[in-house]
Image (spheres, grey):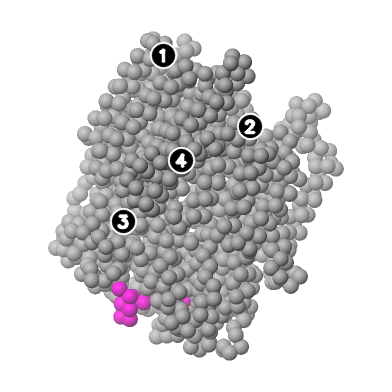
């Protein structure tokens, strides 16, 4: 009974972790950016999605859609206001660009968090589940919404896989992550590729934020945690590796769930952290990391 | 070189003397702000030593600071040990932490090093939250002892500490060891070709940075009477330290202290904004990164060089 | 030469900056205004309520002519839910803004951090919402130093007592409940709360089957609810403040068939319904007062006025903060207009104020919890409210109740109940 509970509970949370982490690693892979404002994008999507429905009375589908768009807009803002100016700045030495991008996105993330808290308070909010009610999964009473979330997460990941492996745009993305200059020689404009990458990222993060809000609830206080979580998973899985991130997401998700059920809810984040330490000491490039 | 050093010495002495006289007319509250700023200055200088000279971007200076601070705080709160013992213990804890961090981290290149330092901060933060019973978790904990209740005494203590650290760190940066560090930082291959043990020197840089950070962290706790994640561990603090060093001018050591003071004073200045003061400071810091990456002292010095 | 110029330029900039601080050095005008510092957490619903209500109270006093002609001015600070920020704000309030008293925070960890500073700086200080027993116990243990601290809300022990009292009246009696699980966040205020729960629950006939303390950072409560359900208790007794929306929503979505009662600070605010999209239906929590419940003649007018001004109903800290401003004002009057800290302390100890929460008095040196707010019939008992259809309905005490307890359909009470 407990095993089934763990299986079901862990699956949904891992899928959500995976969705968020995949976007994070994609952006790193393609444009070399470790976006520390990641949590901020998810929180914006969640809060706007909630506000649209609760404050302005839109139905939950419209609210959710608006939330996702808000996430996308924030992602664009992150790229255009913070990342691109730093990358193009002549005042910064090329070998220092990464540090400045990291610091810049972190600052931007803080600005988002404080700005949102000012507008909405730091109270977590929830988005009304898209499907109500519970279903019985192998004897475990599970909210139907949770199942839907797992399905959506996998559908999106599947779509992403198709995009990257079967379409020209996708292959260009992949190429850009390996050799930006080479891709331009093939006639692709890098700007357009980056734009596409950030669009995909914004959508993924936005959807993850909205789904998380309907499943567990999200508030500005979670911003740092969300970034840290995506970030830890991506380090575990290997920077730039989408499949690595997915595997790591499930490893972390299940480790946490098992700890919460079998040991104590208080100690939930510990095993994942210990694993992170081990990985950093033994195999710093992660499970499937390339660089 | 000697000419330059003596000028810096005279200007530095003038600044310190002026600062020492401030308690004569500034309010207790402002002295308190500057006191915290001085400790922050030590954080920033310690970071600059590591980054500016050893070339290692440490995203988790607060890992070292936090270790020093919380070790001291817990020893004082749970076991009632006297302040000097706690501070020394804190400094040692930070150094040990520094070594533990440096050993795996220095094997990595590129973004991974920064990542590891970030991970270290996250780990410490999570540990503090999980053991909230002892550490006060996210809200923070109180320590029963403080250095002094008198604002003036606290101020002079912090100023003295900052001055000593500045002298030591600046001297180190200009010494033979410092030059080796700088060489290792800028071109590790050549430095080792010249026969210097790059890794050993970098680990030494980490330990020195840790020593100063940990001590300053512990002292800060005994000044404020509280320890909390968002004063000594949070990534926002780490970023502020980096900003302070960037603002002041990297690789100048003294610039970092200047940047720290400017940043903290600005932060307090904006306190009446209430919720939004963090927002404004972050926005300004972002602007600094975008438009002013060389920092105050950096521009001042480079302009000199160019002419 | 040019290097010198550059460095000198930097030095000049620093000097100018220091000179620029001079205006701050000038003494703040004392004049005929009575300044009260209020430190709240603007991003948190309860913390924001605290400051708003205080400002309202000051406006009310000033509208009636002030305190013997002197204006009351509230200076607000945001401590960002951080003990260190709160200490800094407190220091600023005392040294820079020259306040005569401070009302601060609903977070116990923050209050405990400020308390030593109130002792060191001799500044009268009241918390309108924190609950830890340690706050007032410190006053008892070292009266001469800590006498400046007052506890303007019930201590955890009394909150637990209130919860036990209504559990006895509503659950053990009419609904024949026999077992409970205690679920609380791991924070300073819940340590004494849980101790008191574990003591009083068996006394009223509820056997405690399990005691779960979770990390305040928890966002996924599924394992916790599964663990609770496996124990088959009749009721879940809560102690939550840092969290609220998330466990409540998940309780609702997972259709956990066990009612949740106890202390849920976030559930005392009117925004809770919207934040949880109605999942709050059926949740019972202890609170200071509620809209439409006339605990005292001033309760309903206060709520109405607050709602008119701010668009939401006050959280429990709002009632307390409003009352505490009046308490301080009365104390100053009692002290003959003096704002001397020691005289104020004596005056505050003599408080007997009919506020919005009830009749407010503080315990004296003879009690273990010196300067804590007195609990009991005729004084402050708090009420229990249940969220029904988007409204907070009072369900206890019976003489103040304006509704009966009703649970959502997924709650399965034992066959012997109802």
Q: Which mark is residue C3?
A: 1
Residue at image position (24%, 51%) is C121
Give the labeled residue for mark 3: C115
Local SS, label 4: helix
Residue nearer the viewer, C37 or B160: B160
Q: Are marks 1 and 2 on the same chain?
A: no
- Same chain under badges 3 and 2? The reply is no
How crowded pointer 4 is (Cα within 10 Å; few <14, some 14-19, many 20+) is rated as many
- Dots 2 and 4: beta carbons under 8 Å? no
- Residue sitting at x 66%, y 39%: A282
Foreground disc of the pair 1, 2: 2
Q: Residue C338's quadrant in the figure? A: bottom left
Chain of residue at mark 2? B
Residue picked out by circle 2? B108
Question: What residue sits 30% from the left and 26% below the top?
Answer: B16
State whether discs 1 and 4 lie on one chain: no
Task: Please state the extent of the stretch shown in magenta in the rendering.
Answer: C374-385
Instruction: Say which quadrant the C terminus of chain C sits in.
Output: bottom right
Distance Cα–Cα, label 3 vs label 2: 47 Å
């Amino acid at each position: 009974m407990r095993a089934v509970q763990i299986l079901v509970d862990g699956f949904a949370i891992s899928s959500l972790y995976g969705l968020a982490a995949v976007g994070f690693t994609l952006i790193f892979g393609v444009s070399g950016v470790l976006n520390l404002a990641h949590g901020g994008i998810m929180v914006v999507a969640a809060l706007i999605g909630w506000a649209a429905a609760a404050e302005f009375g839109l139905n939950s589908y419209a609210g959710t859609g608006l939330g996702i768009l808000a996430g996308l807009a924030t992602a664009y803002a992150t790229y255009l206001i913070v990342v691109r100016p730093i990358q193009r700045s002549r005042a910064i030495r090329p070998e220092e660009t990464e540090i400045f991008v990291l610091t810049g996105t972190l600052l931007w993330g803080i600005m988002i968090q404080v700005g949102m808290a000012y507008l909405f308070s730091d109270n977590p909010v929830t988005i009304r589940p898209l499907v109500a009610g519970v279903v019985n999964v192998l004897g475990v009473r599970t909210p139907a919404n949770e199942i839907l979330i797992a399905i959506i997460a996998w559908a999106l990941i599947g779509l992403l896989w198709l995009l990257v492996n079967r379409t020209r745009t996708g292959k260009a993305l992949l190429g850009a992550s390996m050799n930006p200059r080479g891709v331009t020689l093939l006639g692709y404009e890098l700007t357009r590729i980056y734009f596409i990458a950030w669009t995909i990222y914004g959508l993924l993060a936005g959807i993850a934020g909205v789904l998380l809000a309907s499943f567990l609830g999200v508030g500005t206080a979670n911003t740092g945690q969300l970034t840290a979580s995506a970030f830890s998973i991506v380090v575990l899985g290997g920077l730039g590796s989408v499949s690595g991130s997915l595997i790591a997401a499930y490893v972390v998700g299940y480790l946490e769930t098992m700890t919460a059920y079998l040991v104590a809810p208080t100690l939930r984040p510990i095993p994942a952290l210990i694993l992170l330490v081990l990985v950093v000491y033994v195999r710093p490039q992660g499970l499937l990391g390339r660089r | 070189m000697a000419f330059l050093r003596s000028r810096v010495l005279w200007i530095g002495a003038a600044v310190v003397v002026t600062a020492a006289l401030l308690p004569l007319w500034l309010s207790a509250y402002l002295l308190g702000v500057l006191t915290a700023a001085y400790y922050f200055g030590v954080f920033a200088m310690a970071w600059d030593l590591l980054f500016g000279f050893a070339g290692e971007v440490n995203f988790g200076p607060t890992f070292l600071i936090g270790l020093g601070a919380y070790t001291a705080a817990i020893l004082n709160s749970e076991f009632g040990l006297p302040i000097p013992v706690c501070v020394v213990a804190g400094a040692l804890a930070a150094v040990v932490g520094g070594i533990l961090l440096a050993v795996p981290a220095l094997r990595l290149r590129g973004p991974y090093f920064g990542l590891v330092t970030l991970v270290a901060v996250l780990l410490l933060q999570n540990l503090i939250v999980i053991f909230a019973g002892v550490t006060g978790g996210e809200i923070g904990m109180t320590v029963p002892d403080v250095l002094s209740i008198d604002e003036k005494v606290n101020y002079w203590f912090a100023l003295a500490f900052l001055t000593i650290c500045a002298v030591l760190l600046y001297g180190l940066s200009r010494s033979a060891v410092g030059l080796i560090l700088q060489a290792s930082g800028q071109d590790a291959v050549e430095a080792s070709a010249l026969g210097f043990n790059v890794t050993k020197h970098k680990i030494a840089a980490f330990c020195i940075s840790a020593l100063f950070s940990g001590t300053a962290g512990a002292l800060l706790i005994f000044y404020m009477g509280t320890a909390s994640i968002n004063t000594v561990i949070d990534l926002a603090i780490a970023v502020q330290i980096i900003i302070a060093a960037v603002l002041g001018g990297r690789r100048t050591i003294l610039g970092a202290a200047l940047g720290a003071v400017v940043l903290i004073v600005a932060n307090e200045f904006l306190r009446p904004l209430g919720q939004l003061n963090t927002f404004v400071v972050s926005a300004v810091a972002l602007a600094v990164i975008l438009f002013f990456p060389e920092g105050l002292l950096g521009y001042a010095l480079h302009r000199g060089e160019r002419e | 030469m040019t290097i010198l110029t550059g460095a000198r330029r930097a030095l000049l900039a620093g000097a100018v900056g220091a000179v620029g601080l001079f205006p701050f050095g000038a003494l703040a005008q004392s004049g005929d205004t009575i300044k009260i510092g209020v430190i709240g957490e603007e991003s948190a619903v309860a913390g924001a309520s605290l400051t708003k209500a205080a400002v309202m109270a000051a406006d009310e006093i000033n509208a009636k002519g002030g305190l013997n002609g002197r204006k009351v001015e509230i200076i607000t600070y945001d401590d960002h839910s951080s003990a260190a920020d709160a200490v800094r704000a407190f220091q600023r309030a005392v040294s820079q803004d020259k306040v005569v008293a401070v009302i601060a925070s609903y977070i116990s960890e923050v209050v405990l951090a400020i308390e030593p500073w109130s002792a060191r700086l001799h500044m009268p200080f009241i918390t309108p919402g924190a609950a830890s027993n340690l706050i007032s116990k410190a006053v008892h243990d070292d009266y001469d130093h800590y006498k400046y601290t007052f506890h303007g809300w019930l201590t955890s022990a009394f909150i637990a007592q209130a919860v036990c009292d209504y559990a006895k009246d509503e659950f053990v009696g009419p609904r024949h409940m026999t077992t409970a699980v205690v679920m609380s966040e791991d924070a300073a205020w819940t340590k004494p709360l849980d101790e008191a729960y574990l003591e009083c629950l068996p006394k009223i006939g509820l056997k405690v089957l399990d005691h779960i303390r979770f990390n305040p950072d928890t966002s996924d409560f599924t394992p916790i609810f599964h663990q609770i359900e496996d124990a088959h208790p009749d009721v879940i007794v809560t102690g939550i403040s840092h969290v609220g929306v998330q466990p409540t929503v998940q309780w609702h979505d997972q259709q956990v068939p066990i009612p949740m009662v106890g202390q849920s600070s976030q559930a005392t605010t009117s925004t809770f319904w919207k934040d949880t999209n109605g999942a709050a239906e059926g949740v019972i929590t202890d609170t200071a007062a509620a809209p439409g419940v006339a605990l005292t003649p001033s309760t309903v007018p206060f709520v109405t006025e607050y709602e008119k001004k701010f668009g939401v109903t006050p959280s429990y800290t709002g009632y307390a903060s409003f009352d505490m401003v009046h308490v301080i004002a009365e104390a100053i009057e009692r002290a003959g207009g003096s704002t001397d800290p020691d005289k104020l302390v004596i005056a505050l100890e003599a408080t007997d104020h009919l506020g919005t929460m009830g009749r407010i008095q503080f315990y004296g040196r003879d009690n273990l919890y010196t300067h804590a707010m007195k609990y009991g019939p005729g004084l402050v008992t708090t009420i229990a409210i249940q969220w029904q259809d988007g409204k907070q309905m009072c369900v206890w005490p019976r003489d103040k109740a304006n509704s009966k307890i009703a649970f959502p359909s997924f709650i399965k009470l034992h066959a012997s109940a109802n």
